[in-house]
Amino acid sequence: MMFKTISKEQIENHNKKNINNLKKDYEFFLKKTKGLDININNIKKELKNFSIALPSWGLGTGGTRFGKFPIVGEPNNIFEKIEDCAVINDLIGITNSISLHFPWDDVEDFKELKEFTKSYGLKFDAVNSNTFEDFKDYKHSFKFGSLTHTDKSIRDKAIELNIDCIKKGEKIGSKALTVWIPDGTNYPGQQDFSKSLDRYINSMKKIYSKLPSSWKIFIEHKPFEPAFYSTVINDWGSSYYCAKLLGKKAFCLIDLGHHLPNTNIEMIVSRLADMKKLGGFHFNDSKYGDDDLDSGSINPFALFLIFNELTNAKKNKKLNSISYMIDQSHNITDPIESLIMSAIEIQRAFAKSLLINYKILEKFQKKNDAIFSLNHLKNAFNIDVTPLLQMIRYESGNVINPLEFYRNFNYRKKKSKIRKKKFDISATIL
Ligand code: PSV
Ligand code: MN
């Protein structure tokens, strides 16, 4: 672990103040879980190996089409965003990688970026391509689509941008490309559904052919927005179909917000795991649609049910290695606080799923005992794993109470003295 912004001593001082309480809470947690027939050391090991990538685009304050409210000390570029990621990881220890988005995160010198990131003990996860905006130097517009556009020269531009992402990713040690396209329509009849899917597959084949052998490509589906009548890769079925056609390096990525309300996402997880095509996640939460709310803030039980499927699939040896990433927009909070809380909520859901005894659950399922099956899941879900997560942080040299530490650390205030101000008015500090 490398501590650059927060010193080891500061962490130790915080932990000294909190360890006695934690020991009591942890004892209680052990007592509560005694009868569960679980191996706590194995669970700790699994949790210590678990990591979630931070989205570079989630580090600045987000906004909606109605506006944006900046905070002081916000990062202005990818280097400053990486400093912020390091603060998060120093505190919680489960977010040692960053997912970049191009061309948003373009730099002149990728070697410098890689070294800089490494010096903070961080690395890069999947890179993401942006074909949902036009940039100044573009001669072609993505207004009516990118990889599926009717005009070949525009498709070629989108293909080129994705291949460019792979090249940049290679320079920084990334091993995957996530492709999400905004392509779709706003009017019935605007596009031939079948032909646009064909165009997508042909474009993706060209990108796939440039994928290094150790790389994966993730297909991210989304049923609406910015296209509101239809999208080309609208659901997991289309995503699976394309991943299957492309080949063994292609997988499906589930962004939790990319489903119609009340979709049973955990079931999609199970299906894709069975089909060996589950590649990764973009975690967030939502109430209505793709709201990009903080992970676990709306429906922690649904998040737990997703991890229940993952843990069960892993036990049954049906799971490939999965890329866990966060993709959410922090419009009214300090993104660092949101990301700390979100990563812990994801880890919490995972930890609770590790408390499920699948042999017992199976017995209830075989007897068609609906209530005791649910009760078994609920028992795991209702156990407070906070002391377990705190103990893991403590043992790994991270912080027992990260949000409290961060508030007292006055990071934004410190940074506001060094970082260029983006706005003069209405910039707040929490
Ligand atoms: C699209 O809504 C998305 O979920 C994709 O992952 C994009 O890369 C990201 O959000 C951009 O904000
Ligand atoms: Mn996403």
Image (spheres, helix red, strand yellow):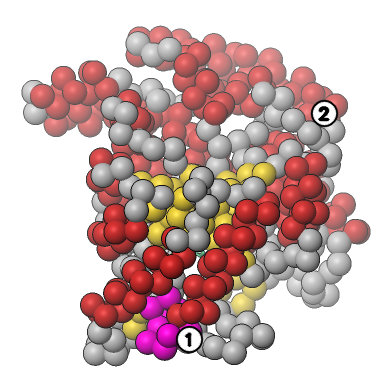
* Position in image of residue 133 (x %, y %): 55, 79
| Numbered label tally | 2
Tell me what residue is drawn at x 40 percent, y 72 percent: 203
Residue 258 visible? The answer is: no
Q: CA distance from mark 1 to mark 2?
A: 54 Å
The part of the chain drawn in magenta is 144-154
Residue 161 in view in this figure? yes
Q: Residue at x 66, y 85 (%)?
A: 137
Q: Residue at x 29, y 74 (%)?
A: 198
Magenta stretch containing residue 61, yes or no?
no
What residue sits right under mark 1 in the picture?
A: 153
Compared with 235, 252 (above or below) is above
In front here: 339 or 152? 152
Q: Where is 55 relative to 389, above or below? A: below
x and y, in percent, of residue 376 in the image: 26, 25
Question: For the residues carrying marks 1 and 2, which lies nearer the camera in this image?
Answer: 1
Q: Is residue 79 left or right of residue 329?
A: right
Question: Left or right: 83 with respect to 390?
Answer: right
Q: Amino acid at mark 1?
A: Ser
Q: Residues within 10 Å of mark 2 (few under 14, many from 20)?
A: some
Left/right of residue 327 with respect to residue 252 in the rendered view = right
Q: Is mark 2 within 8 Å of ligand 1?
A: no
Disc 2 designates what residue?
8
Relative to 8, is 103 on the left or the right? left
**Residue 301, relative to residue 105: is it above or below?**
above
Where in the figure is residue 367, as x and y percent of width and height? 8, 23
SS under mark 2: helix
**Crowd around label 1: few <14 · some 14–19 · many ≥20 (10 Å):** few
Mark sitting on residue 198: none
Disc nearer the start of the sequence (1/2): 2
Q: Residue at x 55, y 66 (%)?
A: 163
Amino acid marked by disc 2: Lys
